[in-house]
């Protein structure tokens, strides 16, 4: 992580929320060195964390209409979002002398494509 993540002098540490499967616990560990990190379970129905300056949402299981509206409101109120998803699922297995990484295709949920509203500058 770059030095730009540190809070300016006199300001509280940034708050970063992470919604990710347990396999991504290393990201939480790294981010915790530079910011206050909140773990959230967005796939379990939790709301987007309004106290977060930045949200990492990794491998979302679902993204329905109401969640898209919530994401839009989150972005419109000045929050930042990093969303990562893939049609492939990685499975990482520790072997005695190496890591084994397997990729398998998975169907994506039936969702509508998202287009942010036009913003005036």
Image (cartoon, rainbow, N blue to C red):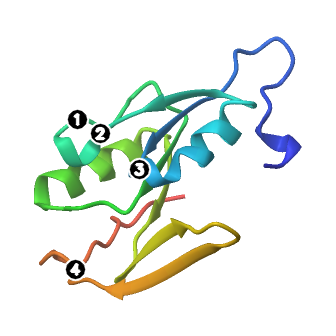
Q: Quadrant of the C terminus?
A: bottom right
The vertical placement of 120 against 26, above or below, is below
Disc marking residue 41: 2
Which one is nearer the viewer's eye here, 97 or 5?
Answer: 97
Q: Earlier in the sequence, mark 3 or mark 1?
A: 3
Q: Earlier in the sequence, mark 3 or mark 2?
A: 3
Spot occupied by residue 85 in the image (x, y as percentages of width and height): 40, 71
Say whether marks 2 and 1 touch (CB < 8 Å).
Answer: yes
Q: Find the distance from the CA under tag 3 to the CA under tag 2.
A: 8 Å
Q: Find the distance from the CA under tag 4 to the CA under tag 3.
A: 17 Å
Q: Earlier in the sequence, mark 2 or mark 1?
A: 2
Residue that badge 3 annotates: 20
Q: Find the distance from the CA under tag 2 to the CA under tag 1.
A: 6 Å
Q: Residue furthest front?
A: 96
Residue that badge 1 annotates: 46
Q: How would you rate the neighbour count of disc 4 (Cα within 10 Å): few for under 14, some for 14-19, many for 20 or more?
A: few
Say whether marks 3 and 2 touch (CB < 8 Å).
Answer: no
Q: Find the distance from the CA under tag 1 to the CA under tag 4.
A: 21 Å
Spot occupied by residue 76 in the image (x, y as percentages of width and height): 40, 46
Q: Residue furthest bottom?
A: 105
Spot occupied by residue 1 in the image (x, y as percentages of width and height): 78, 49
Q: Find the distance from the CA under tag 4 to the CA under tag 2.
A: 19 Å
Residue that badge 4 annotates: 108
The vertical placement of 77 against 97, above or below, is above
Instruction: Tell me if 33 is positioned left or right of 15 in this view.
Output: right
Q: Earlier in the sequence, mark 4 or mark 3?
A: 3
Which of labels 3 and 1 is toward the front? 3
Q: Secondary structure at mark 3?
A: loop
């Amino acid at each position: 992580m770059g030095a730009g993540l540190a809070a300016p002098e006199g300001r509280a540490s940034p708050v970063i929320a992470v919604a990710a499967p347990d396999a991504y616990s290393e990201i939480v560990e790294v981010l915790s060195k530079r910011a206050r990190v909140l773990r959230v379970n967005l796939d379990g129905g939790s709301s987007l964390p309004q106290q977060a300056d930045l949200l990492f949402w990794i491998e979302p299981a679902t993204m329905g209409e109401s969640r898209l509206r919530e994401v839009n409101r989150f972005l419109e109120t000045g929050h930042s979002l990093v969303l990562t998803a893939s049609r492939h699922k990685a499975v990482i297995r520790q072997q005695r002398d190496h890591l084994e990484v397997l990729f398998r295709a998975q169907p994506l949920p039936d969702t509508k494509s998202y287009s942010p509203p036009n913003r005036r500058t």
